[in-house]
Amino acid sequence: MNFRSFQFRITKWFVGFLALALLCVWVGVYLSVQQFLIASQKRNLNNAVYNIESQFLPEYGAKGEVWLADEMGDVYAGGADRYVRILHDGREIFNSHDMGNPQTPVEKIPLPTNEQAGLLHIDNRGGRLLELVDHYTSPDGQRFIVIVGASDASARRVLRSLAIILSIVCPLVLIVAALACFLMIKRPLRPVTELTEQAENIGRKHLGDRLPVPNTRDELQRLATSLNQMIARLEDALQHNNRFSADASHELRTPLTIVRGELEQVIQQPDLSEATVDSIGSALEEIERMSQIVQSLMATAYLDTGGEQMEREPTDLGKLVGSTLDQMRLLAESQNIVLSNEKLESALVDGNPTRLKQVVVNLVDNAIKYNRPNGRVSASVFSKDQTVILQVADDGIGIPEGSIPFIFDRFYRADKTRTRATGGIGIGLSLVKAICNAHGATIDVKSRQGHGTVFSVAFPRYLPETGTSEIRSPKTASVSTYVTTSH
Ligand code: ADP
């Protein structure tokens, strides 16, 4: 489970607030019921005192103590959570005796003093007692003290049960609500996930694509619209950039051809000094290098804008790599590098053979160029799931960690100390990436400085049944973790 996901975080907040709310409910319900029970206990005591004083005590003078005990005994017998005592001139003339629960002998409860009246709270072994003491004078002038008391045992029993029920129900509600929230939140978040996936699929070459805008008039609609506007601006900037590169290289190509032609004519003249021939020779070399840059720039720009209509055909990548390696073996030997092919499976990709060859040549050329004497370079082609993987590995100097994100940029060279003769001009990999993008392929590099580099290109496999390749969303080159290459 992703603990940083929206789904989890929203659920976490929801559960936090719900737990707080349930705690308030728990405390609120408990206190309310407690207050209600105390109030009803007081009301019962008041009613009992009122009854005794209005029904029995006025007739005490006429009917006597036995009558009172009989009449009161019927109504206020022992065994309940309540007791009644009546004092007359300091003498106890009625006692309802034991309370049901707790079994507190009423005689052990201290009698109130003459000054005590109203509600008294008495601490007792079995809990607390609430006692109402009232001084009453009957119409015939007799003075009584009426004591009605009750234990809070039954109220405490109710409160204990309530606490247990609340302590079970609240966590249960919390768990069920958390689960429901976690599952239900997935639904409204689904459009966001879909939008993210669609946005990820709009790769560099496919910046022309747009996200579907849901007609929901909510944040999602705004987000999709804003993202589309941003993609449109990006596309514009990128096209402008590519157009500029394409136009500039196009404009440079003709003068370069003319200068080269002129210099080639001049160098043919017989009366030139050796120094002049050398100068013209090195000028021609530089012009050749510039022509290469211009050509690569043009190709990259056209591929990036999708301007170049590549002719594609089912191409056996294994065979193409094999023949390219054969052609490059001499170059490798001249640099004392062993060039080998690990595993060249015959695997079809839908591509342009010339461009695919450019990818192989550039990767292998780099692997030879950035190697050490007696180093090794190996290339392999194999199928994996729906892709055909081209891998070029070397045990050369490797790429510094900080440079890896930039090596696919135009004119970027990781090792600035290299001369343009021993290093390159920094355009090969940007062309490789542009070709990969145009083929819907992804390129990945793993490298460790001083140990070597592995470039892996994953092409969509050509499917003969449908005549198409399983084109995955073209992505810009990805840069992955740095691993030790085992060569
Ligand atoms: P260049 O023409 O300089 O070779 P590239 O675009 O082909 O330009 O490569 C960009 C930079 O990436 C190179 O300058 C080099 O520093 C680094 N690089 C590319 N391939 C390798 C490799 N196999 N080993 C080490 N460094 C490499």
Image (tube, helix red, strand yellow):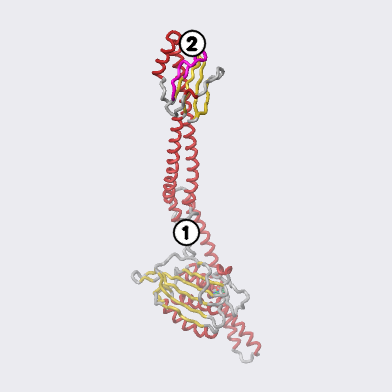
The dot on residue 199 is: 1
Q: How many marks?
A: 2
Q: Nearer the viewer, residue 35 or 442?
A: 35
What residue type is disc 1 on?
Ala
What residue type is disc 2 on?
Ser
Q: Nearer the viewer, residue 417 or 434?
A: 417
Residue that appears at 57% across and 79% down: 289
Q: Residue 487 placed where, x, y %?
A: 51, 77
Q: Residue 225 placed where, x, y %?
A: 48, 53
Q: Residue 183 placed where, x, y %?
A: 42, 50
Q: Earlier in the sequence, mark 1 or mark 2?
A: 2
Q: Nearer the viewer, residue 202 or 8?
A: 8
Quadrant of the rendered image containing residue 390: bottom left
Badge 1, how many Cα within 10 Å: few under 14, some, many 20+?
some
Residue that sits furthest to the left in the current view = 465
What is the C-alpha distance between the residues marked 1 and 2? 93 Å
Q: Which residue is mark 2?
A: 138
Q: Which residues are magenta?
A: 85-98
Query: Can residue 251 be seen by looking at this rendering?
Result: no
Q: Main secondary structure of the magenta part?
A: strand
Q: Residue 439 placed where, x, y %?
A: 44, 70
358 versus 133 height, above or below:
below
66 versus 98 height, above or below:
above
